[in-house]
Amino acid sequence: SNPSDPSFVHVECPLQIASLAPAVELLNHTTNGALAAPRFDADRDSLVISTAAAQPKPGGELCLCYGALQTWEFLLHYGFCPKDNPHDRLTVSLSIPEDDPLYDAKHIVFELHGIPVDHALRPATPVKLSPWQESSSMDVDPGPGDWSLLGILSPQLFRALRILLVEDIRALGVIDVNAPPGTAIMLDLDIACLDAAEGLLGGLLENCQPLCKDKDALPIWWSQYGEVIQSFQETQHQLIMANLDAVRAARTCLASAAAARP
């Protein structure tokens, strides 16, 4: 188009806009890609892809991070599932049973403490510590009275279970929803919460079993889509198992503390 042409129309575009970029589509994805996100350079009137702060290794593949997407989004938009995705989440929704005699009171407690009904389960992604963190970290496992006892399990999910499992209106008024797990006065309730969390995650795990155990009864679409769908199931299974392991470890710790009470 010629800008001097009367029919030429200039349109202001936002800084981020969906577009087709055939050359960019040749780049594979990795979470820590050596390439920065593509950007439009107005001076050069070109789409520019540059290396990020960390320089790629000589001879290594140049990869791009497609974004902080959940695994189902990779499957939906790109047709593959990354095996290790630190941005993956699985949402668990909790609600107060309508026939709960404490329904109104529990709803008020949820509102007062700002506790949501939707909670995200996250994967067990290893965290790389800096040299200073490694030298200053103590090789001590967390115990009762420490929020880190929950590991990757959502603290908000734990707080919600505390409210949901209370059966007495007087107890609902005195429980410390924000107390770290395993606090002496909350110990028995916290163990019950972890039991409930284990049952909840166990139920989710049932939905992530292999789709087709009988190889002689595979659906007609399996040859084309079966592998990638099975890969997605496996990533969700691993995510739930990581949270289930965190729940069981925390429960074992609190059960030991309960057994040691005078």
Image (tube, rainbow, N blue to C red):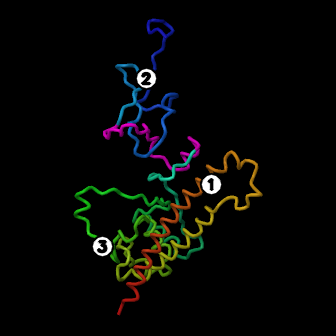
What's the amino acid at mark 2?
Glu
Q: Say whether residue 249 is left or right of residue 53.
A: right
Q: Secondary structure at mark 2?
A: loop
Q: Is residue 187 above or below residue 24?
A: below
Determine which residue is flagged by label 2.
12
**Going 43% across and 32% down the picture, which residue do you hit?**
16
Q: Residues within 10 Å of mark 1 (few under 14, many from 20)?
A: some
Magenta part of the chain: 52-79
Asked whether 93 or 148 is in front, the reply is 148
Q: How many numbered marks have been drawn onto this rendered protein structure? A: 3
Mark 3 or 1, nearer chain start = 3
The span from disc 2 to disc 3 (Cα, nearest Å) is 57 Å
Asked whether 17 or 162 is in front, the reply is 17
Determine which residue is flagged by label 3.
140
- Residue 27, percent across and down? 48, 35
Magenta residues: mostly which secondary structure? Answer: loop
